[in-house]
Image (cartoon, grey):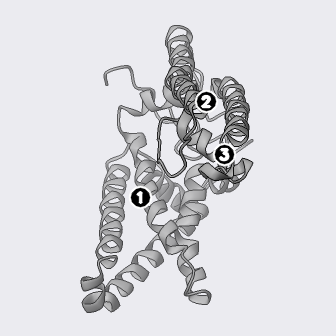
Amino acid sequence: MTARTLTPRQKIFYEIIFGTETPAGKWFDICLIAIILTSVLIVMLDSIWDLHAEWGWLFWQIEWGFTVLFTLEYLVRIWCSPNRKAYVLSIYGVVDLCAILPTYIALFFPQAASLLIVRLLRILRIFRVLRLIAFLNEANMLAGALRRSARKIFVFFSMMIIITMIFGCLLYVVEGPESGFTNIPISIYWAIVTITTVGYGDVVPVTALGRAISATGMLIGYAIIAVPTGIITAELASGLRGNHLTTRNCSQCSRAGHDLDARYCKYCGSDLPALHQEGD
């Protein structure tokens, strides 16, 4: 995937908005963090009824001001992006779009609860600038371990579904509707709550056999907690021993996993940031 040629003006905006190596780029990200935090603070204050009753109109105006500002930022990012499709489809591009759309949708559906999603997504926008922090290397390593563990975790999760269904059916047969196990889905819900050691107590067995099965499920729950942790830990150790790729993130599409001598992103073709050694 090749990057398109930018005009001199687009290059200036690209270095400021997407770049992290220049003072202007760093100041832009710092200001963006401040604006995001302020926006989140306004949303939090507006959720307090007393403040909303007195200052709701002002909060609404400020909220729309931030929405317009984020909309302009999103459009400028698309305009100066070397690979527009890569940015729009990247996680940062999707978050940027989803953070502004619900506010406009609320104009037509005022009763929609999607504004709550806006709050959450605006908090997620903060993580976009965390790529400037040295800890991003560790975050990339953890993400790689999770990705390599996906199939093992899926098999483990499938086995857990089978186990909970077996326990739920057993309790449905043993206890019955008299003890609150009125159907198999409710019994499976009880099994999930029990095996995960949450134990809400809204449905409990009363017979001796039912309690014995319940105790077995609790012990199994404690035993299986360590399984996914062990899988991910093994993948982390494997990555630490044999990792020959850098953890640089492309400033355009945010993807990592590039070769040591790579100058361009192998996913979108954009320039890669300079390689920093461990401890820089």
Which residue in the protein does label 1 denote?
A: 123
Q: Quadrant of the N terminus?
A: top right
Mark 3 to mark 2: distance in Å? Answer: 15 Å
Mark 2: amino acid: Leu
Query: Which residue occupies the foreground of this view, 83 or 33?
Result: 33
Mark 2 lies on residue: 209
Q: Position of residue 32 (x, y in %)?
A: 36, 60
Query: Farthest residue in the top direction?
Result: 241
Question: For residue 208, which quarter of the picture?
Answer: top right
| Residue visible at 68% across and 23% down in the picture | 152
The percent position of residue 71, horizontal first and vertical second, equals 52, 73
Task: Indicate the quadrant where residue 188 lies.
Answer: top right
Q: Residue at x 47, y 41 (%)?
A: 198
Q: Which residue is mark 3?
A: 187
Q: Quadrant of residue 161?
A: top right
Say whether residue 22 is left or right of residue 93: left
Of circles 2 and 1, the one toward us is 2
Residue 7 shows up from this direction: no
Residue 4's spot in the image, x, y percent? 69, 51
The type of residue carrying mark 1 is Ile
Give the amino acid type for the residue marked by disc 3 in the picture: Ser
